Image (cartoon, grey):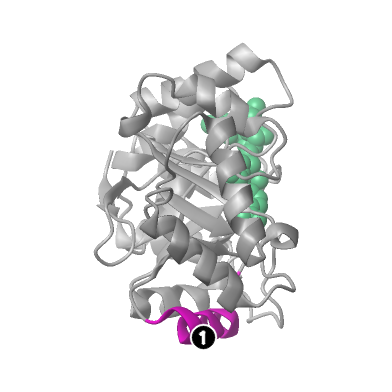
Amino acid sequence: MRQQPFGTGGPQVPVIGQGTWYLDRGDRRRAIAALQRGIDAGMTHIDTAEMYGDAELVIADAISGRRDGVFLVSKVLPSNASHRGTITACERSLQRLKTDYLDCYLLHWRGSYPLEDTVAAFEELVAAGKIRSWGVSNFDNHDLDELLAVSGKGRIACNQVLYHLQERAIEHAVIPWCEKYGVAVVAYSPFGHDEFPSPRSAGGELLQSIADGHKATPRQVTLSFLARAPGVFPIPKASSADHAAENAGAGNLTLSAGEISAIDKAFRRGPKPHGLPML
Ligand code: NAP
């Protein structure tokens, strides 16, 4: 599995990670087995959030005995992101995840608490050793400008944003902003949540033909396309171990310039929307 720095000066993190939204909804043992198969295959970056029901509890079981081999990320809800509320929410997540530190802690989306308060809490958590870094999610480039003015350079580890073949809005301004300031881009819902191109569509047929040339699958081709720019980390969610193993296989797949250009034409980027799309 290819690894790359998680933001400038950040630790090496595998290019493909694992999402966990709705992972608590099905059979728990199956979910644990999927996460573990993913970790075994190199997808050690695990993304969760206090919002994701019991996902943090499922992860605690999946990483039991191997915490230090995992890059663990959770998120505070905007409604909890006051100075005190952020610290309490983090402590709650640590308890549920049965760990004493997070590798990265994110503000899930921008809410009404001043960024100064949330950032001050994040920095306090870093100083206390409860989190190793912090970042944000669903921030557009102008939100990132405001955040940078509060935090100063070199403090924002990542921005986690919606990115899949049919939703490429972040390519206009968010990815360039993050590249400029050395901030990792974590690509959520890389399969469109539940809207992966049908095999019978023109785009689906293209993905299959590119996949055939690499003895790969359309989903692996998709993840490799999304991760083509340095510093981008897709985090597919899988509740089946076979799906997890397939997704991990994308971590060693490199597409040619011609293949990238064909996918680019089949799934148009489109104009920059007014607001940043999010789920
Ligand atoms: P996704 O990863 O785009 O798609 C998940 C769906 O794809 C599930 O139905 C899953 O099925 C299926 N799938 C996965 N691998 C597959 C494979 N190899 N073959 C066939 N089907 C496969 O959707 P997502 O969960 O919305 O996004 C991923 C993660 O991003 C989330 O879990 C969460 O951690 C994060 N996220 C963050 C935000 C945010 O606001 N920050 C918002 C949304 C998501 P099975 O479960 O049956 O395997």
Q: Identify the residue shown where x is 51% and y is 75%.
A: 174
Residue 104, percent from left and from top: 44, 52
Decide whether the magenta segment is chiefly helix, strand or loop: helix
| Dot 1 alpha-carbon crowd within 10 angstroms: few under 14, some 14 to 19, many 20 or more | few
Q: Amino acid at mark 1?
A: Asp
Question: Can residue 221 be found in the magenta stretch?
Answer: no
Q: Quadrant of the C terminus?
A: bottom right
Residue range of the region highlighted in magenta in the rendering = 139-152
Question: Can residue 148 be found in the magenta stretch?
Answer: yes
Residue 175, percent from left and from top: 46, 73
Q: Quadrant of the N terminus?
A: top left
Q: Which one is in front, 63 or 222?
A: 63
Above or below for 180 versus 170: below
Does the image show residue 108? no
Q: What residue does disc 1 label?
A: 145
Q: Quadrant of residue 37?
A: top left
Q: Which one is in front, 165 or 188?
A: 188
